[in-house]
């Protein structure tokens, strides 16, 4: 059975700050873009041969050290100066966070000793990074984790950490592919039958006086037309909030297929959700509209 179709708001600084792609930042001793390295007993370097959806992957070499002294290896924290905090929908105080990423440890001895930790207010979610043989691409890993977060200014809620499992020592190497995709307040979409997915290739054409046709093509991108009905008040308000602020979104066509996630924006010229349908008296299920979405680029996951 296929999975769900989801739309959610992407957290994190824009302009590829969550990516390990060095074209958008400089590899430093303590940080790469908006990721901060906490331990001096580990080193960061780029890998070009295992890139997922941008040019570089993070390679983290960890010296022989126990979790007691090592702590958090790498952290990306939301809600601080380099993040647009307004992306959290202001009308609610708790938010669901969804995280997707790719990675591997390079030896079976350290398999599961490293974890991506999603920090919540009341509980945390751990995702152990397994061993996978070397190669190109995402190398056999995808994950989805979710927790309920209570937002507080500059808190650790929503922080994405790479940590070492307690009690584990010894050298280790872990590769994190491209970027994590932290998504807040996702909505399950149920489009009408006239849903459309298309690939667009902008072009300009000019024919000379002698009849020669010249065509100038730009890079193609993806576009979707998503008719929706019976949306709740909260979902209608949330989609319109994303539209009016121009936020970057994660559009997942099928949650059972890791290759159907796109970074996108709502490109409607007018408010996407604004029609009321019968029965008007019901608070849930009374809104309709057509979402027009376009990918941010050719379909990569950096934003």
Image (spheres, grey):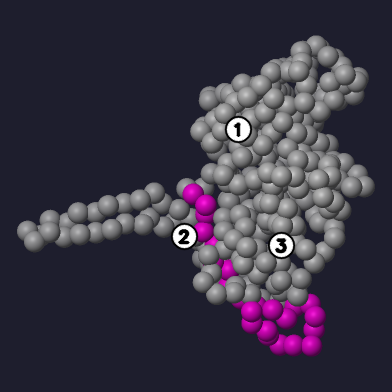
Residue lying furthest left: 210
Residue count near mark 1 (Cα–Cα under 10 Å), binned few <14, some 14–19, many ≥20: many
Q: Hey, which quadrant is residue 68 in on the image?
A: top right
Please say if the residues under marks 3 and 1 sit with CB atoms less than 8 Å apart: no
Q: Which residues are magenta?
A: 274-297
Between discs 2 and 3, the one toward the N terminus = 3
Q: CA distance from mark 2 to mark 3?
A: 21 Å
Q: Is residue 91 above or below residue 168?
A: below
Q: Which mark is residue 188?
A: 3
The image position of residue 6, as x and y in percent, is 67, 58
Q: Is residue 141 visible?
A: no
Q: Is residue 295 magenta?
A: yes
Q: CA distance from mark 3 to mark 1?
A: 29 Å
Q: Which residue is found at the position 84% from the left and 21% from the top? A: 70
**Residue to which mark 2 is pinned:** 198
**Residue to which mark 1 is pinned:** 20
Q: Is residue 156 magenta?
A: no
Disc 2 or disc 1, which is closer to the eye?
1
Badge 3 element: strand
Q: Is residue 95 left or right of residue 59?
A: right
Residue lying furthest front: 81
Q: Hey, which quadrant is residue 285 in on the image?
A: bottom right
Between discs 3 and 1, the one toward the N terminus = 1
The image position of residue 293, as x and y in percent, is 54, 62
Q: Hey, which quadrant is residue 239 in on the image?
A: bottom right
């Amino acid at each position: 059975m296929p999975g769900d179709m989801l739309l959610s708001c992407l957290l994190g600084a824009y302009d590829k700050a969550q990516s390990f792609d060095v074209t958008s930042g400089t590899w430093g001793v303590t940080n790469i873009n908006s990721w901060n390295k906490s331990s001096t007993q580990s080193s960061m370097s780029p890998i070009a041969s295992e890139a997922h959806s941008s040019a570089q992957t993070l390679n983290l070499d960890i010296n022989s050290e126990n979790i007691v002294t090592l702590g958090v290896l790498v952290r990306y924290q939301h809600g601080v100066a380099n993040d647009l905090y307004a992306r959290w929908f202001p009308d609610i105080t708790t938010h669901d966070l969804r995280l997707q990423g790719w990675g591997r440890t390079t030896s079976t001895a350290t398999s599961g000793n490293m974890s991506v930790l999603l920090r919540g207010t009341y509980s945390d979610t751990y995702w152990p990074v397994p061993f996978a043989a070397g190669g190109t691409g995402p190398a056999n890993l995808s994950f989805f984790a979710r927790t309920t977060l209570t937002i507080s200014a500059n808190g650790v809620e929503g922080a994405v950490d790479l940590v070492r499992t307690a009690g584990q020592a010894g050298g280790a190497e872990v590769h994190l592919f491209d970027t994590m995709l932290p998504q807040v307040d996702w909505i399950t979409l149920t489009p009408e039958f006239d849903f459309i997915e298309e690939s667009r290739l902008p072009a300009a054409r000019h024919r000379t006086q002698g009849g020669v046709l010249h065509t100038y093509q730009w890079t193609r991108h993806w576009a979707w037309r998503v008719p929706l009905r019976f949306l709740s008040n909260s979902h209608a308000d949330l989609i319109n909030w994303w539209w009016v602020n121009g936020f970057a979104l994660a559009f997942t066509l099928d949650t059972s297929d890791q290759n159907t996630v796109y970074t996108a924006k709502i490109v409607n010229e007018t408010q996407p959700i604004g029609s009321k349908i019968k029965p008007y008296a019901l608070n849930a299920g009374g809104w309709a509209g057509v979402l027009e979405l376009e990918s941010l680029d050719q379909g990569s996951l950096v934003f």
